[in-house]
Image (spheres, rainbow, N blue to C red):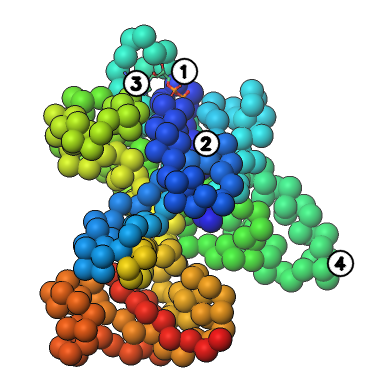
Amino acid sequence: ALTIGIVGLPNVGKSTLFNALTKNQVLAANYPFATIEPNVGVVNLPDPRLETLAGIFGSERILPATVSFVDIAGIVRGASEGEGLGNKFLANIREADAIAQVVRGFADSDVVHVDGKIDPASDMETINTELILADLETLDRAIARYEKEVKGKKIGPEVLAAAVEAREVLQAGTPLSASKVDLAPIAELGLLTAKPFIYVFNVDEAVLTDDARKAELAALVAPAEAVFLDAKIESELIDLDPADAAELLASTGQEESGLDQLARVGFDTLGLQTYLTAGPKESRAWTIRKGWKAPQAAGVIHTDFERGFIKAEVISFDDLVEAGSVLEARSRGKARMEGKDYVMQDGDVVEFRFNV
Ligand code: GDP
């Protein structure tokens, strides 16, 4: 599964957030045979459509899609030079598919800030500079190796060219995600600044309810997505029953928990989407990549479904709800038979037809 690595300076609330994510552990309940890594937090992707489907089909259970977060320890200034514990953690981030940077926005004189003051812009700059330096170091080593391999005709010149071009971008202080360099030839390097980024502002209630301040912080990181939450409140929410949790959320001016927002933004940032299946046993969301065609999507349920794919009966969620049943949707002409070139759309309720 694709994972999102959590990074940030020390004392910004990474562990508090990650504990909330792991307390929210859903994998164990839904997938009893899956093994859970201790440093991975798996959260449900909230999707109210599943409840609706379960109502229509009388499903016994609901299985939402999930998003996985990996806890990676803090980065300090100098991490890219191997100061402190830096290098090992940078190596761990390399394996993540996206990065969530936790930024401290809460003021609390009992919690020391590593750089002595609460300054989100400066904190982000510190982290992003370390990531750029780490990528430069990776590229320096790779370029030395690629030069030999190109001479020895072991690799094509385009690999070296891509690495050199990427190095120039970074030397100008630009993260690779903000450049147009084609990194496909050097994908093996797992360059950190090329990964999709989410910013998680760990703030207190004063900021949560201050839309102007939130807009200001969001503008600092655009076009990357910003999520605002209070890690302490999130860890309390997990222990409350739904009614009390809703009340606590409302008291901080929110409709949705920060973890739910993070799951949604994370899922989207990873380039993922879902399609839905429903029946008396379960209503379920299946995870695919945006742009996938029907047979590939069918393969997520079972490889036989992809191999023996014939067609997919697709009803849009809204059409199905309006019709009230599959039969009625069919008689209204809202059930479409789609072939192997059909590109899956968000909210498709699907039944695959296949040969075994
Ligand atoms: P990490 O080093 O980034 O993992 O930070 P921790 O999660 O260990 O948090 C550092 C300290 O800040 C702990 O004492 C937390 O209880 C506290 N803390 C974390 N999040 C918040 C928050 O949202 N508000 C306040 N007031 N304190 C927080």
The answer to whether residue 123 of the structure is visible from this angle is no
In the foreground, 267 or 331 = 331
Secondary structure, mark 2, is strand
Return the residue at label 4: 152
Mark closer to the chain start, 4 or 3? 3
- For disc 1, the neighbor class at 10 Å (few under 14, some 14 to 19, many from 20) is some
In the foreground, 331 or 45 = 331
Mark closer to the chain start, 4 or 2? 2
Across and down, in percent, residue 82 comes to: 67, 29
| Residue type highlighted by circle 2 | Asp
- For disc 4, the neighbor class at 10 Å (few under 14, some 14 to 19, many from 20) is few
Q: Quadrant of ligand 1?
A: top left
Image height of 133 relative to 270, above or below: above
| Residue type highlighted by circle 1 | Val
Across and down, in percent, residue 285 comes to: 37, 63
Return the residue at label 3: 118
Instruction: Single out the mark in the foreground, 1 or 4.
Output: 1
- For disc 3, the neighbor class at 10 Å (few under 14, some 14 to 19, many from 20) is some
Q: Are marks 2 and 1 in contact (CB under 8 Å)?
A: no
Mark 2 → mark 1, Cα distance in angstroms: 19 Å
Q: Is residue 177 left or right of residue 199?
A: right
Mark 4 → mark 3, Cα distance in angstroms: 52 Å
In the foreground, 113 or 355 = 355
Residue 331 tag number? none
Residue 71 tag number? 2
Q: Residue at x 48, y 86 (%)?
A: 354
Secondary structure, mark 3, is loop
The answer to whether residue 312 of the structure is visible from this angle is yes
